[in-house]
Image (spheres, rainbow, N blue to C red):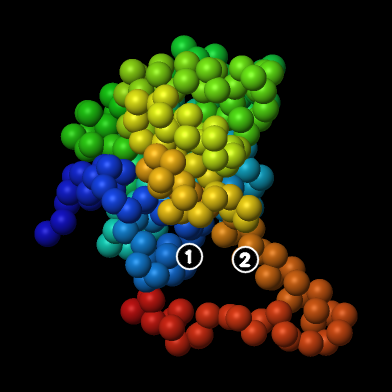
Amino acid sequence: MTTQQDKAQLFQSLHTAEPVLVLANAWDVASARVVEAAGAPAVATTSAGVAWGLGYPDGDAVDVDQAIGLIARVAAAVGVPVTADIEGGYATDATGVGRTVARVLEAGAVGVNLEDAHHGGDSPLLPIAEAAERIAAARAAADAAGIALYINARTDTYLRSVGEPADRLQATFDRAGAYLQAGASGIFVPGVTEQATVAKLAEGIDGPLNILVGPGAPSVSELGRLGVARVSAGSSVAAAAYAVARAAAIEMATTGGYDTLAGELDYGTLNGLFR
């Protein structure tokens, strides 16, 4: 029988082995089952997709009970490890982050994304010390539960265009070093896909590097050659699905056609994922 700790250790190993860990993020049970059935070795949730599906905007606005309930349903529905994007920890301080992580572990996840964005604050990012304190609290909660939680510490230095462009690389190194020292397992740097910068990040960060990908980004194999350990689609898959829904609605209401639906997943195939 595979235990949660077994899944945690497997998920850890996926960041250090070939090939690059590829995560096409899910936002509900159906998308998680589709991703797993496609052969993914793990399922990652997208905070934006989860929030939208639950009726909230992205940005630490989702109801924490509903978010954790969704994580529990996803973890129960798939056999592969699940890592949950919990934004800033759905809490105002490190103690609260620790409580959230304990609940996420109880829900069955073995990894989390924890970001340093300061939604609604007077600066785009949390102070380094405060963000590191939150990571330390997450690690303490995992240690108390006896689970080797993979903490993917996200820094939005590039995504939020913090400071001068010439200073962002060093700022990212400073944050990555502090986060790894506080107990992070790896570092997630969304907002950058330029190959020379990615290569510098991979070389300068003393832990697995996660990059956010989408149209226009280097291929997975190219990112692997640059030293990237993990690539994520983030909210893009959910947004693409909603784009199909909008296009279909417009087409049906205007031309009366159905061509937008031509690429739909076969009913029997999809329905069979839930038996």
Which of the labelled discs sits on residue 31, or is there none? 1
Q: Relative to 234, say whether 31 is above or below.
A: below
Count numbered badges in the picture.
2
Q: Badge 2 local density, few (<14 within 10 Å), some, or many (20+)?
A: few
**Mark 1 Cα shell of 10 Å, populated few (<14), some (14-19), many (≥20):** some
Q: Is residue 236 left or right of residue 185?
A: right
- What residue is rendered at 31% in x and 43% in y? 15
Q: Tell me the SS state at disc 2.
A: helix
> Which is more toward the observer, 101 or 181?
181
CB contact under 8 Å: marks 1 and 2: yes
Residue at the image position 41 percent from the left and 36 percent from the top: 209
Which residue extends farthest right? 254
- Residue at label 2? 241
Residue plotted at (59% across, 59% down)? 238
Residue 264 location, x and y as percent?
A: 58, 80
Toward which corner of the image does residue 195 lie, by quadrant? top right
Residue 228 position in % (x across, y down): 41, 41
Residue flagged by tag 1: what amino acid is it?
Ser
What percent of the width, then of the height, locates residue 270?
Answer: 46, 79
Q: Nearer the viewer, residue 195 or 207?
A: 195
Residue 95 vs 228, above or below: the answer is above
Sequence-wise, the earlier of marks 1 and 2 is 1
> Closest to the observer: 200 or 208?
200
Q: Amino acid at mark 2?
A: Ala
Cα separation, mark 1 vs mark 2, equals 10 Å
Residue 130 seen anywhere in this rendered image of the structure: no
Give the left or right position of residue 54, taking residue 110 as reference.
Answer: right
- Which label was assigned to residue 216? none
Residue at image location 46% in from the left, 12% down from the top: 129
